[in-house]
Structure formats: structure tokens, C-alpha cells
Image (cartoon, coloured by chain):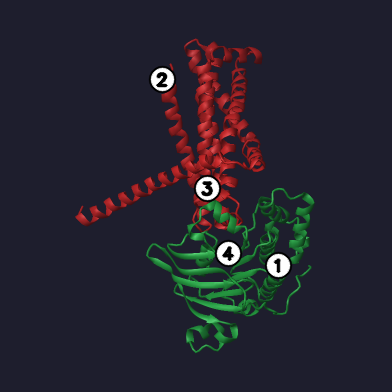
Chain colours: A green, B red
């Protein structure tokens, strides 16, 4: 199997870059359960932000709010300078075409082959693109994730790690500016997890994307993060680089690094 | 019965009724969205054709078998009674009329409710649970237009076609059943059936099947699209889709019969 070329943990620096994604005081409740209680965060262009948190801390809800899959009760979500909470669905789609989303289990379309999965997404975004260009884009995306040989396979024939790679290929084929990763290494063995984490860095470098990675896998966070935010009870309770948070005096924060 | 038990019973009934009306309200909004989306441009024609094939062509064997058996059994069962009144010669037209006006449309729609509504419910339910519908939405692809509109359009068009086809097969089944005891050529049998059929027998029977098809597609898509998270909900979506679609067919048939009755 051809593997993607890892970047040996070289992360892009983003100090002077512009903010392209910002959450201000975002609240979301389900009945009596307040999941997000005034979440604030901002992401700079080219940055890899990891959001850590225990299961049920609201990480996945937060990331789904970013693409309008879940509507927030209160607060502002600015992406590329536009508050998406006020947008109608058609206008929101103009933002969505610039964002990629990798689901926890890949969310590949079961009834389609790998080629059709990629083609379906690409053709809906660029209906006038020629067959040759579609083929070229599919091969390039599959090559980026190191799975050219899986092109004619059905999703049911793929392993968990392969499904995530193909999911990532389907995401990058539309050349998004931001990629959101929902627990990209969950359910994978340590080696495959490392491969996926390195692939995230490789994709960021190759396609110059900004990434938000939701995880509770510390190895993944260590490899991918420029900056880490820790979510607790619906709010950010700590922020910093991996090295900074590892030395935190807060016992709860340090408990992630043990 | 003490007062607290009474209060509990009342609150259970209230919740049950509230859920039913909420469900009807949501389904109405879901159907309204269909009419909004269907008039928009960029119809997913390829997916629509695929659904027509999956819903129509793939249902042919089961529809053929049931229609044939319906015609055959109805003829065999009716013959002794008709013979008792010396009206055996009326058997082809009686069977033909019963099949075309009522039995074939309703039974074919029920068969399709079992096969198609459950299939759509399970397919969309599974896509919902495995986040495939969310994946479409975040890719700026309208999942309602791609998955729901195409399926409802396909069922609305294919069910009437299947019913017309089943009418012929049912009449043929009746011909075979009649010839177990009698000896009549197919041309004469078929002429006998057509002789007593009027325009008002055929038209309402066909028109109501468009509504049956719409109901089957709508219920299947609604149940699947609104499946909750968890694999159990996929089975629940398929099951409730069949039950609700079958019930809808009977209710629609009752309304159709009342309306048709006004013209006689």
C-alpha cells in the first residue's frame, strides 16, 4: 500500500496570520442539558487547533455548530468574516463549499464505490468539469491519502483506517480552506492513529488548509496541534501549546497528559 | 381508581396525543418542503431514473406473482357462488371489475408499502445514523433534493405504472382460473372483461394510485430522514414506515371511494 508522505511533525507557524474562524459566546442546550455555555475561540489561517475534552464535553456539538449541522441558541460564529448563524441555507452552502468535514467513521456513501464517493462530491461542486479532470482530481486526492489502489472498492471492503483516509480524500478533493476533523483517530490502533495524524499534517502542508481537530487522543494532539484548547463543561478551561499545557499547574489539565 | 392513578393515565394519553399531532405536523412540513424543492431547478434526474428502476423494475416479480394469484383465487372462489345463481358467464367481468377498481390498486400499493417504504425507511435511516446525510449537507449538497425528492417522485410515478401492469396480470390470472372448469379463449375472456368496464371504473382507480405512490414515498423518506441515532432506530424507521404507509393507503382509498361515489 502506498503511504502518504509524513512531515515529521513540522507544524506551520501562524502568529501573524489573519483570523478566519471565530466563535463568540456560543451556547447550545438540549432540553435541560446545557452543552455549550458561552464557548469562545478563534482560529488563524494555516493553524492546526486541537480541541481536547472528555467524552460528552460538547466537542462534537461545537464542531457541528461550525458547519450549521446544529443551530446554536445564542452567540456568533464568524467564518471568513461572515456570521453563519444568521444565514439562510443557500448562503450557508456558499461557506460550506470552502470547509471540509471528516466524520468520525468517514461517513462514506455505502451504495457508492470509492471513485463514485469522490466523484459525487466533486461533480456537485463543479458540474461543468470534464471527465478527464474528474479522474485526475480523484487520483490526486487518493494519492494524497495513499490509497490509489482502493479506487474501485466499496466502503464495506475497507478497514476503519482506510475509510477515514478515503473520507479525507473526499474532503480534500474540493480543495477546502478549512478542514474540521471529528475524532480522526478514534477506534484505530496506535500505528494507524499515528499515520492518520501525520496525514493531517501532510494535508495541511500540501493544501495549505486550516484545521480544527476534535480529539481525546493525546498522541494525535501532540503530532498535529499548533495550539490546544481544553473543553470542560461547555467552556474552554485551558489553552496553550502541547508543551505549555503538559506543564500546567491545574491538576485536571495535567490529567490529560498522564 | 385513586386520583393519582387517574392523573397518570390522563398525562400518558396527553403525551401520546401530543406525539401523534407533533408527528403529523412534522410530516406535513416535510411534505410541504417536497413541493418547494420539486419546483426548484437542478433536478437530480440521474438519481430519479435509478430510483424508478429500483422501485419499479425490481418490484415487477413480486407484483406479478401477487396480481396473478389475486386474479386466479378471486375467480376460483367466486365461481361456485356465481354458478349457484346461474351467472357464471358474468364471472370474467365481475372479476375484472373487482380487480381493476379496487383489489389490484390496494393490494399492489400494500405490497409496495411493505417492500418500498420499508426499504426507503431503512436506507435513509441507516444513512442518517452513519452520518452520510450530514456528510452530504456539509458538502453543500442538498440531501432533501437528492434523496427525498427523487424517491417520492419515483414512487408517485412508478406505483400507477405497476398497478396498470398488475391489472393485466390479474386479469390473466382470472382467465387461467376460469379455464380450470370452463373453456374460453383469451381474446373472448378479455373482451368480456372490457365490455363491462367504463371510463369511470378505470380513471379513479388509476388516479388514486398516484396518491398511494406519493404516500409510500413520503412516509418512507420521512421515517428514514428522521431516524434517531443508533442502529435500533433503523429497524424502527423501516417498521413504522410500513405500518404508516399501509394505514395511509387504506385512509386514502376510503377518501377516494367516497369521492368516486359522488360521480355515480
- Chain letter of the residue beneath label 3 in the structure image: B
According to the image, label 1 marks what residue? A207
What kind of element bears circle 2? loop
Q: In the drawing, does residue B87 fall left or right of residue A98? A: left
x, y percent for residue A20: 58, 68
- The extreme left residue here reads B2
* CA gap, disc 1 and disc 4: 17 Å
Q: Is residue A70 visible?
A: no
Rounded to the nearest angstrom, the CA distance separating label 4 from label 2 is 62 Å
- Which chain is indicated by disc 1? A
Residue corresponding to mark 4 = A80
Where does residue B192 sit, x and y in percent of width and height? 58, 12
* Residue B230: x %, y % from top left: 52, 59
How far apart are the alpha carbons under marks 4 and 3? 41 Å
Question: In the picture shown, does residue A160 fall above or below B124?
Answer: below
Which is more toward the observer, B230 or A150?
A: A150
Q: Residue at x 50, y 23 (%)?
A: B204
Please give the residue where the numbered disc 3 appears in the rendered image. Answer: B238
Amino acid at each position: 500500500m502506498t503511504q502518504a508522505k509524513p512531515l515529521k511533525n513540522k507544524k506551520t507557524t501562524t502568529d501573524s496570520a489573519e483570523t478566519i474562524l471565530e466563535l463568540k459566546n456560543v451556547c447550545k442546550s438540549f432540553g435541560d442539558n446545557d452543552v455549550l455555555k458561552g464557548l469562545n475561540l478563534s482560529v488563524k489561517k494555516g493553524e492546526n487547533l486541537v480541541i481536547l475534552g472528555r467524552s460528552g464535553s460538547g466537542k462534537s456539538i461545537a464542531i457541528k455548530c461550525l458547519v450549521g449541522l446544529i443551530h446554536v441558541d445564542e452567540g456568533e460564529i464568524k467564518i471568513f468574516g461572515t456570521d453563519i448563524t444568521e444565514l439562510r441555507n443557500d448562503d450557508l452552502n456558499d461557506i460550506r463549499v470552502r470547509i471540509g468535514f471528516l466524520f468520525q467513521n468517514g461517513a462514506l456513501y455505502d451504495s457508492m464505490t470509492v471513485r463514485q464517493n469522490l466523484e459525487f462530491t466533486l461533480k456537485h461542486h463543479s458540474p461543468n468539469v470534464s471527465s478527464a479532470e474528474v479522474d485526475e482530481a480523484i487520483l490526486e486526492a487518493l494519492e494524497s491519502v495513499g490509497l490509489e489502489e482502493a479506487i474501485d472498492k466499496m466502503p464495506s471492503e475497507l478497514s476503519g483506517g482506510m475509510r477515514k483516509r478515503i473520507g479525507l480524500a473526499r474532503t480534500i478533493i474540493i480543495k477546502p480552506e478549512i478542514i474540521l476533523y471529528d475524532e480522526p483517530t478514534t477506534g484505530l490502533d496506535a500505528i494507524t492513529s499515528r499515520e492518520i495524524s501525520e496525514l493531517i499534517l501532510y494535508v495541511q502542508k500540501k493544501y495549505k488548509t486550516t484545521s480544527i481537530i476534535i480529539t481525546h487522543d493525546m498522541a494525535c494532539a501532540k503530532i498535529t496541534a499548533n495550539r490546544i484548547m481544553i473543553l470542560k463543561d461547555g467552556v474552554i478551561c485551558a489553552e496553550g501549546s502541547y508543551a505549555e499545557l503538559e506543564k500546567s499547574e491545574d491538576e485536571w489539565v495535567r490529567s490529560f497528559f498522564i | 381508581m385513586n386520583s393519582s392513578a387517574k392523573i397518570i393515565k390522563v398525562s400518558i394519553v396527553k403525551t401520546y396525543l401530543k406525539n401523534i399531532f407533533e408527528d403529523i405536523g412534522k410530516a406535513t412540513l416535510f411534505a410541504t418542503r417536497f413541493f418547494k424543492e420539486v419546483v426548484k431547478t437542478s433536478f437530480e434526474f440521474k438519481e430519479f431514473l435509478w430510483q424508478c428502476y429500483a422501485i419499479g423494475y425490481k418490484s415487477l416479480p413480486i407484483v406479478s406473482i401477487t396480481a396473478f394469484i389475486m386474479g386466479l383465487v378471486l375467480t376460483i372462489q367466486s365461481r361456485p357462488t356465481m354458478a349457484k345463481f346461474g351467472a357464471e358467464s358474468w364471472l370474467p367481468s365481475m372479476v375484472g371489475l373487482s380487480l381493476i377498481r379496487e383489489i389490484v390498486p390496494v393490494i399492489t400499493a400494500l405490497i409496495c408499502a411493505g417492500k418500498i417504504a420499508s426499504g426507503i425507511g431503512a436506507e435513509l435511516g441507516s444513512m442518517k445514523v452513519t452520518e452520510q446525510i450530514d456528510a452530504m449537507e456539509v458538502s453543500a449538497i442538498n440531501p432533501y433534493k437528492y434523496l427525498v425528492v427523487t424517491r417520492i417522485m419515483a414512487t408517485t410515478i412508478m406505483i400507477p405504472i405497476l398497478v396498470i401492469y398488475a391489472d393485466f396480470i390479474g386479469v390473466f390470472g382470472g382467465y387461467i382460473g376460469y379455464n380450470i372448469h370452463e373453456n374460453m379463449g383469451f381474446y373472448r375472456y378479455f373482451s368480456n372483461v372490457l365490455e363491462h368496464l367504463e371510463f369511470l371504473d378505470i380513471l379513479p382507480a388509476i388516479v388514486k394510485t398516484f396518491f398511494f405512490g406519493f404516500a409510500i414515498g413520503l412516509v418512507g423518506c420521512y421515517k428514514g430522514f428522521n431516524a434517531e441515532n443508533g442502529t435500533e432506530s433503523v429497524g424502527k424507521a423501516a417498521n413504522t414506515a410500513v405500518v404508516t404507509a399501509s394505514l395511509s393507503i387504506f385512509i386514502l382509498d376510503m377518501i377516494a371511494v367516497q369521492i368516486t361515489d359522488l360521480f355515480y
